[in-house]
Image: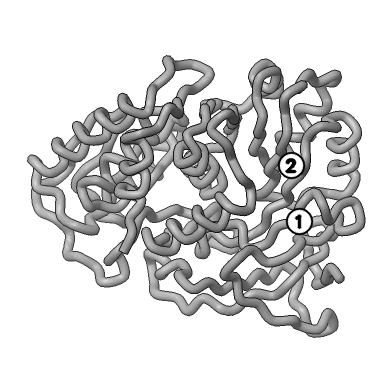
Amino acid sequence: MMKLGELLGNVLAQSQGTLQSSSSEVLTASQIAAAADSIADSLRRLGVCNDELVLVIVSNEPVDVVSYLGIWHAGAVVVPVHATSQKANIVALREQTAARFVLVEGKVEQWATEPAPLRKELTGAAFVVFTSGSTGQPKGVIVGHQGFCFKLDVLSKLLAFEASDTVLVPLQLTFIFGIWVTLLGLLSASKVILIPKFTAEVSIRYLASATILSAVPTMLRAILAREPVDAPQLRKILSGGEPLSPSLAVLLREQLVSAGIYDLFGLTETGSCDFCLSPSEQPQGLGTIGRPTDGVEYRIQPVASAVAGTRQAGLPHRGRAHFTAAFDAPRATPNLRRTGRKRTRSGLR
């Protein structure tokens, strides 16, 4: 079974790609690999177990990506939590996960000596991403190595990042969208630029040289509000995480004419991006979530019986479980037409 640490390690060994943020120095591929190996060695010396949960306090800096890679090299599981989270929430997460180790700015801290009992659902897990909890208490979604490697391969073919690309990522690395875009950029030997805290002004500054922008529609709207936007090399916009309204898509097409828009929709449980509305299907497909990406199984459900807000997806290597309880991931439904926060089914012909 391919694992993310192995996949990234193989690429970094021969890559000329770089990783930086708007507030830190540039890391080369060799520096990323060496720093990740150092973290893995530290965890092994402290006795980290296979499939053990390790917290990472995330500030959206390159060192966070290095920490993820180091944890994977050590055979453990990443649990990202943002640095701005309230202390009480971090303590609660520590108690829920029973994590012994936490990485802060690439440094390993040990909170406890005895490992928690291993849980079967964590076997082969890459990370546990805690969702926003829009339906109640936030839940941890377990994403496996095999499924996420499969998804990255699908997205690599779909989006065709190149070594010459500069990928701008104002998304948080606690968010599945931010995670996969960053990893895909590294796997493609691209130049990846992280923005620790989104502002339209900082984003526009880096858009002057970016070729790919990944953002949620709220960010895109804020960027366009600062017009004119100078992005002469921008060739792709990746939108996800929120519904992309047809009106915003039209504005993007008018103001950033050289950039094709990829409207991506999916579940955290499946690694995101289960559907894509590609540039070739616009403008006629605007307002839908497009077509299923490779490997996604789906079924058509009549509009009359659809439940607004319901999202389903099934993959060959789907998300393994919720951390709090095992789950049975249902199948997917095709194109969902967005109307505000509700979604009704529609299909592209």
Could you say where residue 106 lies in the image, as x and y percent from the top left?
Answer: 28, 29
In space, the residues marked 2 and 1 are separated at their CA atoms by 14 Å
Q: Name the residue beneath numbered marker 1.
A: 277
Q: Residue at x 35, y 34 (%)?
A: 14
Residue 231 visible to the viewer: yes
Q: Compared to 168, does 301 lie above or below? A: below
Q: Nearer the viewer, residue 317 or 327?
A: 317
Q: Compared to 73, does 19 lie above or below? A: above
Q: Quadrant of residue 18?
A: top left
Residue 201 visible to the viewer: no
Q: Compared to 190, does 43 lie above or below? A: below
Secondary structure beneath label 2: helix
Dots 2 and 1: beta carbons under 8 Å?
A: no
Q: Residue at x 75, y 60 (%)?
A: 289
Q: Residue at x 69, y 81 (%)?
A: 299
Q: What mark, if any, has residue 328 been given in the picture? A: none
Question: Image check: 263 left or right of 346?
Answer: left
Q: Quadrant of residue 67?
A: top left
Callout 1: 10 Å neighbours few (<14), some, many (20+)?
many
Callout 2: 10 Å neighbours few (<14), some, many (20+)?
many
Could you say where residue 63 lies in the image, as x and y percent from the top left?
Answer: 36, 28
